[in-house]
Amino acid sequence: MKKVYYLILLIATFFSCKNDTKTNGKLNVVTTTTMITDLVKNIGGDAINVQGLMGSGVDPHLYKASEGDVSKLTNADVIFFNGLHLEGKLDDVFEKMEGLGITTVALAEKIHKNGLIGSENFASNYDPHVWFNIEYFKEFTKQVTNTLSEQDPKNKALYEANEKAYLSKLDKLEEDIKGTVNALPEEKRILVTAHDAFNYFGRAYGFKVVGLQGLSTVTEAGVQDVQKLASFIIDHKVKAIFVESSVPKRTIEALQKAVKSKDYEVIIGGTLYSDALGNAGTPEGTYLGMYRYNIKTIVKALL
């Protein structure tokens, strides 16, 4: 309770000092995950100021707001976040921001519920990792464009032009991914990772996805989870398993050892980007580059 009271007090303090003048006459936009930050920068370009709360390798499931984050949020004109309880420890903060009149947009929560994958592990009851379905990321793109256009009408034409260009790139990405996946026989399309971040990817491209920690990284996998998945790997003759950049690799290394103890060899096929992009300035530091890197890594290791 003390932490909640302190956070509310901190928000109230920053909000009382909020500067209503846009920086350089531009919208101040705050984003959470690196995927959303990259998207908003592509649509907003130089017409907006963007500040992302999370960096490369940051796990949004575990992320807590700092005093600096609260300052950024209270001085934002627009806040874009994933929602569906992905940033679970920030939910109270977003609710408070909305209550203070700041435009907050939970992008994933605007996707039609019939298209979401159910989950009892999240307060939303849905798997929040929707960005791995490129069609849903296109919906994110349209939402961002509409929101920026509503908040900054004078730059609407720019936002819409950027949207058109980015949607074209997403179409090309989708085409390329399908071509790469088709090189992998269906019986080899079993993706074993640290946690279940890839279910939307799996449904889109015919992969059976098994995560050691389930959908969230809040609770670590136990010995029984490791042994059960080790048996699954052996039974299905899985060739490779994968580390995730935002999850400690010790869990997958423990799984590899468990498999080896049962006289079967499985390799670690590489590191995938799941809940965060790669380093800024690298191809993997963009959504498009991350997706291409992931699929090439998966197919190469499983072939």
Image: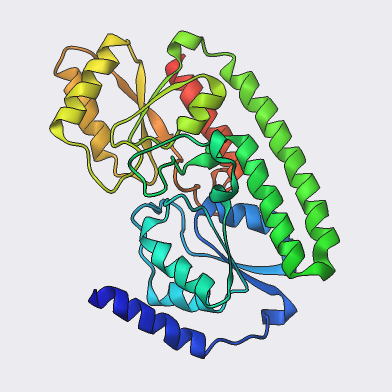
Measured as percent of width and height from the top left, residue 234 is found at: 26, 12
Instruction: Check the image and report above or below for 246 versus 98.
Output: above
Going 50% across and 55% down the picture, which residue do you hit? 33
Q: Which residue corresponds to the image point at 16% horizontal and 36% vertical from the top-left?
A: 222
Q: Identify the residue at the far bottom of this view.
A: 17
Image quarter where the N terminus lies is: bottom left
- 264 vs 35: above or below: above
Tell me residue 118's x, y (percent).
43, 35
Q: Is residue 273 left or right of residue 133?
A: left
Q: Position of residue 236 (x, y in %)?
A: 32, 11
| Colouring mode (rainbow / by chain / secondary structure / one colour) | rainbow
Task: Please indicate whether residue 223 sits to the left or right of residue 94 in the image.
Answer: left
Give the tally of numbered discs: 0
Observer able to see residue 259: yes
* Front in this rendered view, residue 112 or 300: 112
* Residue occupying the point 53% across, 70% down: 98
Residue 281 appears in the rendering: no
State the image coordinates of residue 192 (x, y, percent, origin top left): 36, 26
Q: Residue at x 72, y 56 (%)?
A: 145
- Front-most of 70 and 188? 70
- From the viewer's side, name the closer residue of 30 and 116: 116
Give the vertical position of 260 relative to 6 (above or below): above
